[in-house]
Image (cartoon, rainbow, N blue to C red):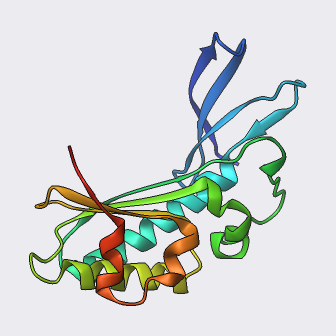
Amino acid sequence: MNWKIDSVDYDFKNDKFIANVISDSGISFLVDEDYYGQMMDNYACSIWMDEIKTAVTKKAKQVTGSDAEVIVDIYSLGSHTIIYRDEIPSYSTVSRAFSSNATIYIKGNFSATHYLQEMLEIKQWIVEKKYDASLTFEPKDKDVYFYLPTEDLKKIKKPEDLNPYRLQIN
């Protein structure tokens, strides 16, 4: 493997070193020790975050006609950590196990008049792809955002179903 240690930091609070490593495909991930001295990393989560970010960015551009800022976070803790030695499965095959620890944030140039329809189209696509995660939409030109918990994604069928998830930006 042509992986490179990008940086090493010391976590004073937990008394351990943490290395930021970059894989040969450009995926950045963390390597550290757990409380028992066992090496652990978030490589699989980093692969999944990259997979989802790339796909959602492409879909958002297809729907809105412009680039969107997409941030994906998948974190695993303790017994939720899964170690893959040979091949890491796609996120859609493991999404149910990680959905409560996953978020997708999309900030985009949604249509002034059809933004709910555009968000619904992206949401439906995310559900079809089995990218189970909480979902946040932030239209760039509005002072609101929409937060959709993972467990509610399949309940939203029409553009007006998004209204209860509308929150004001302060």
For residue 43, say whether it is visible.
yes
Q: Residue at x 22, y 67 (%)?
A: 67
Q: Is residue 28 left or right of residue 68?
A: right
Residue at the front extreme of this rendering: 164
Vertical relation: 74 (above or below) 155 = above
Q: Is residue 149 left or right of residue 114?
A: right
Vertical relation: 109 (above or below) 159 = above
Quarter-of-image position of residue 141: bottom left
Quarter holding the C terminus is top left
Vertical relation: 3 (above or below) 87 = above
Residue at the bottom extreme of this rendering: 158
Q: Residue at x 64, y 46 (%)?
A: 2
In-front residue for pair 121/33: 121
In-front residue for pair 61/8: 61
Q: Is residue 105 left or right of residue 67?
A: right
Q: Residue at x 16, y 68 (%)?
A: 109
